[in-house]
Amino acid sequence: MRALIVSDVHSNLEAFGSVVDDAKARDGFDEIWSLGDLVGYGPDPGACIDLLRDHQHQGVAGNHDLASIGELSLEAFNSHAAAANRWTAKQLTKDQFDFLGELPLKLESDGFTFVHGSPRDPVWEYVVSVSAAVASFLHFDTQRCLVGHSHIPFICRPSEDGAVFLEFPLDTPIALGDDRMIINPGGVGQPRDSDPRASYAIYDSEQATATHHRVKYDIPKTQGKMRDHELPEFLAERLAYGR
C-alpha cells in the first residue's frame, strides 16, 4: 500500500493538484492521508475538499478547518487568518461544511497516529521543540505519529537527550524500521521553510519507507485568485517566498 501524506493544503488548489499529479507520476498511491488544514488562507476551499474526496482517503481536522465551520473562536487567530476563515466559511456548501465537521482530531491507521498539531494537543500545539517532541512521544501508542501544523518537514526520533529533529531529505526513501518517530511531511499550500514548492511524503508499506518530495506549482495563479477574492495581500505575497 502506498499513501500520499499531505498537510496544510490551505485551500491552494494549484499546489494540491500538482502534488496529486506528481505523486501519481512517482508510482502512484492508493489513498491520501490528510493531516488537517485543508482550508484557510487560500482561494479554493471547496475544490480542495472535493479533490481529497475524489480519492480514497483518511484524515483529521486542523485548527483552520474547525475555525471555518465555527468550532473554534477566531479570536485565537491573527487578523489575516481570521479574515481568510471568515471568507472561507461563506464559500462552503453544506456537504463540504459537514465533511469538515465530521473529521476526527486524532486517528490511528496502519501503525500510525494522525494528528494536526501534536498527539498531546491535536488542534494547537506545534511540534517544533525538543520539549514538545518528548511530551508527544508519551501521547501516542503506535510506532509512528504523523503531524502537520508547522508547515516544516522533519523526522523526529527519541534520543538519549529526549528527542532529536532530523532533516527529511528529498527523494530519498527513509527506512522506518521498528523505531518510534514523528514525521511531518511539510506544507502543501503554504510552505514555511523558505522553499515555496509544495511539500508532501509517500509512505510505502511494502518497503516500510517514507519519502519526502517537493513539486513546483503555479504560484502566480493562486495569488491572482486570492487578490480577485480580496483575501489579505500578505497571505498572497508569502507564497512566493515559502515563509
Image (cartoon, helix red, strand yellow):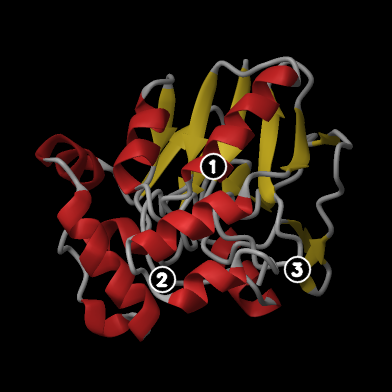
Residue 174 relative to residue 239: left or right: right
Q: Amino acid at mark 2?
A: Trp
Q: Position of residue 22 (x, y in %)?
A: 69, 28
Q: Amino acid at mark 3?
A: Ser
Q: Position of residue 123 (x, y in %)?
A: 37, 64
Secondary element under disc 3, as helix, strand or loop, is loop
Q: Amino acid at mark 1?
A: Glu
Q: Can you tell which quarter of the image residue 23 is in? A: top right
Q: Can you tell which quarter of the image residue 3 is in? A: top right
- Residue 4, compared with residue 149, is above or below; it is above
Q: Position of residue 101 (x, y in %)?
A: 19, 47
Residue occupied by mark 1: 14
Say how many tags the image has. Answer: 3
Residue 163 visible in rendering: yes
Query: Around disc 3, counting alpha carbons within 10 Å, would you say few (fewer than 14), some (14 to 19), or many (20 or more)?
Result: few
N-terminal of the pair, mark 3 or mark 1, is 1
Q: Which mark is residue 194?
A: 3
**Residue at image x 64%, y 69%?**
134
Alpha-carbon span between mark 3 and mark 2: 22 Å
Residue 147 visible in rendering: no
- Residue 17, compared with residue 56, is above or below; it is below
Q: Quadrant of the C terminus?
A: bottom right
N-terminal of the pair, mark 3 or mark 2, is 2
Residue 117 relative to residue 22: left or right: left
Q: Which mark is residue 124?
A: 2
Mark in the foreground, 3 or 2:
3
